[in-house]
Each structure stands twice: as C-alpha cells, then as structure tokens.
C-alpha cells in the first residue's frame, strides 16, 4: 500500500507528458526498490478537454470498459503492458479514443470481475458489461449503485475478499 501511494505521488509530481512516458519513468523509479514478489498494476490516463480524447497506458491492469452511445455497443479498450517494477527499461504503449455524448468509461479493479459466489463462479467482465449496458441511460451515480447491488446479489453469502474500486465517467456533452 505504501509503495502504491508513493507511485501515485510521484506520478502527480511529474511534468505533463504522455501516459506511456510517465509509466516508463515510474517503472524505472520503482524497479530497483521492488522485490521479485512485488509488482503494481496500473492504468494511467489523461483526458484532453478540447479534443475530448482519453489517452491511456496500461501496466498489467484491467482493460477500460467503454459504452459507445453512438453505436450502442460495449467495448474493451486496452494496450499490452507489464506491471510496474516487473521488467527494467520497459517501454509502455498508449492508445486513445474520443469520448462522445452519452459515452461511459469504467476504470475498475479485479475485485469486481473476480468477486465469487457460493458456487465459486466469478462475476466476470460479461456481467459487468451487462450491468453498465442495462443502466446506460442512468447517471454515473446510479450506474455505480447498480454495479454494487449486482455484485452483492451475485455473491450471496460469499465474503468479498478483494477490494472493489472503480471510477465511472459519463459524458454529458
């Protein structure tokens, strides 16, 4: 946890560059201080208000879940990249897409997709996609509530063993 906070603080202090460049720099900073058993997954992004473009880089984290309103489809957006601290001098890739009116972007941890029910079945990405799609006409706050309710209902009596962290962006313009 302390290492994760340190990485985020370092990221906040960096110059305004591309996510892939900042990920490479972060990787180098922590590579020397991390043990073989440790690593940090992360998806780093920047949003350009003028062009409505989200540019992101991925260090072994989950893909972005994106609802594209104009096409009425759910998409997964990712680029390959290893966890921070895993390989020295690793060059991260980045990708971009435009966020249009009505689009929804979900950043999430594996605590959602790996939530288990009493039959040891995983919640999975398809269920998450279904919840977002079925609530696409609602506010980001209501989508959040729907996701949490669906996970709780799915788990039943099974204890949640991993954290559930997510951010929902919904474009109004």
Image (cartoon, helix red, strand yellow):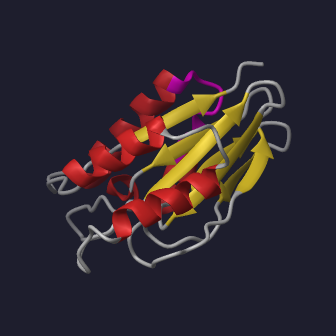
Comparing 163 with 116, the one in front is 163
Q: Which residues are magenta?
A: 131-140
Q: Is residue 79 above or below residue 160?
A: below
Q: Is residue 91 above or below residue 132?
A: below
Left or right: 156, with 91 as reference point: left
Instruction: Say which quarter of the image contains residue 24.
Output: bottom right
Q: Residue at x 38, y 59 (%)?
A: 123
Q: Residue at x 23, y 78 (%)?
A: 37
**Residue 125 position within the rendered picture, expressed as x and y whole percent measured from the top left:** 50, 60
Specify whether residue 126 is in view: no
Q: How many marks?
A: 0
Left or right: 99, with 81 as reference point: right
Q: Does residue 137 belong to the magenta stretch? A: yes
Q: Is residue 67 above or below residue 92?
A: above
**Residue 71 position within the rendered picture, expressed as x and y whole percent measured from the top left:** 84, 44
Q: Residue at x 35, y 63 (%)?
A: 30
Instruction: Say which quarter of the image contains residue 51.
Output: top right
**Residue 45 position within the rendered picture, expressed as x and y whole percent measured from the top left:** 60, 44
Left or right: 134, with 2 as reference point: right
Q: Residue at x 45, y 36 (%)?
A: 13
Comparing 171 with 50, the one in front is 50
Specify whether residue 142 is in view: yes
**Residue 131 position within the rendered picture, expressed as x and y whole percent measured from the top left:** 52, 44
Q: Quadrant of the C terminus?
A: top right
């Amino acid at each position: 946890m302390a290492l994760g906070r340190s990485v985020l603080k370092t990221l906040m202090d960096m110059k305004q560059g591309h996510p892939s460049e900042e990920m490479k720099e972060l990787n180098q900073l922590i590579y020397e201080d991390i043990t073989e058993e440790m690593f940090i997954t992360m998806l780093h992004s920047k949003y350009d208000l003028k062009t409505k473009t989200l540019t992101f880089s991925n260090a072994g984290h989950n893909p972005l879940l994106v609802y594209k309103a104009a096409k009425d489809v759910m998409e997964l957006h990712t680029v390959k990249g290893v966890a921070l601290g895993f390989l020295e001098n690793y060059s991260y890739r980045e990708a971009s897409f435009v966020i249009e009116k009505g689009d929804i972007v979900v950043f999430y941890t594996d605590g959602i997709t790996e939530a288990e029910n009493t039959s040891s079945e995983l919640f999975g990405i398809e269920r998450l996609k279904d919840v977002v799609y079925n609530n696409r006409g609602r506010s980001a706050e209501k989508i959040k509530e729907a996701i949490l309710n669906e996970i709780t209902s799915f788990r039943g009596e099974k204890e949640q063993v991993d954290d559930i962290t997510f951010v929902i962006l919904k474009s109004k313009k």
